[in-house]
Image: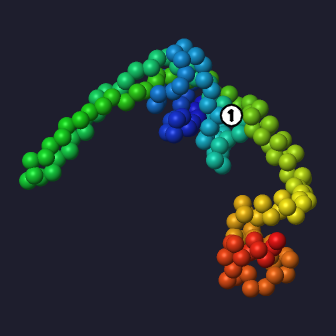
């Protein structure tokens, strides 16, 4: 069984008990971490590809240690100019071991988000009725497009050539 997982912006093909090096994770050494961004899973007989992620699949891993990768030399040169610059750096990486690939896991975070979206969708914000004094103060905070739509609703003509100040006067 293997899975293709997105870990810190890169995709990795992982199997159980596999060790791999990834970009530095913000987890202490020895701690467990789980990845929900599984792009594909194959268990030998069947495979499923996510759009973009496979739901209900989770990859658990353990951070073994944090270290630096081999040195990368960055050499810049411009010919016939006498310009040469040699720099280098070592990338911060983490070594992890895949402990398990779990299927049939319910994601509590996604379930909560979907419930919140469902609860919010039927409710529509009703326009608040505001007194004339407050409305004139609020008009200056609105954009020109919003002022033009309000002017259309009130039946004011010639709004296409009006500036913001003229629109506020016409609406007041």
Q: Which percent across, then down, holds residue 101?
A: 63, 27
Q: Residue at x 75, y 71 (%)?
A: 168
Identify the image quadrant of residue 3. top right
Give the colouring mode of the picture. rainbow
| Residue in front for this viewpoint, 70 or 17 | 70
Quadrant assignment for the C terminus:
bottom right
Quadrant assignment for the N terminus:
top right
The number of numbered discs placed on residues in the rendered structure image is 1
Q: Which percent across, then down, holds residue 110?
A: 75, 38
Question: Quick check: 145 above or below 12?
Answer: below
Q: Residue at x 16, y 47 (%)?
A: 77
Q: Residue at x 84, y 59 (%)?
A: 134
From the image, tell me which residue sits under label 1. 57
Q: Is residue 104 visible?
A: no
Q: Which percent across, then down, holds residue 62?
A: 56, 19
Does dot 1 land on a helix, a strand or a loop?
Answer: strand
| Residue in front for this viewpoint, 77 or 157 | 157
Q: Residues within 10 Å of mark 1 (few under 14, many from 20)?
A: many
Identify the image quadrant of residue 39. top right
Question: Quick check: 110 above or below 168?
Answer: above
| Residue in front for this viewpoint, 128 or 36 | 128
């Amino acid at each position: 069984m293997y899975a293709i997982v997105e870990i810190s912006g890169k995709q990795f093909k992982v199997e159980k008990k596999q060790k791999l090096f990834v970009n530095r994770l913000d987890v202490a050494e020895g701690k467990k971490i789980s990845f929900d961004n599984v792009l594909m899973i194959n268990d030998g007989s069947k495979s499923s590809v996510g759009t973009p992620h496979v739901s209900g699949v989770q990859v658990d891993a353990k951070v073994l240690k944090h270290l630096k990768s081999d040195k990368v030399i960055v050499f810049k040169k411009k010919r016939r100019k006498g310009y040469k610059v040699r720099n280098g750096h070592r990338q911060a990486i983490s070594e992890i071991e895949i402990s398990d690939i779990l299927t049939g896991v319910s994601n509590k975070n996604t379930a909560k988000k979907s419930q919140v979206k469902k609860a919010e969708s039927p409710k529509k914000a009703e326009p608040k009725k505001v007194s004339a004094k407050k409305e004139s103060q609020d008009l200056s905070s609105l954009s020109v497009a919003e002022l033009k739509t309000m002017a259309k609703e009130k039946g004011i003509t010639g709004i296409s050539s009006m500036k913001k100040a003229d629109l506020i006067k016409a609406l007041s």
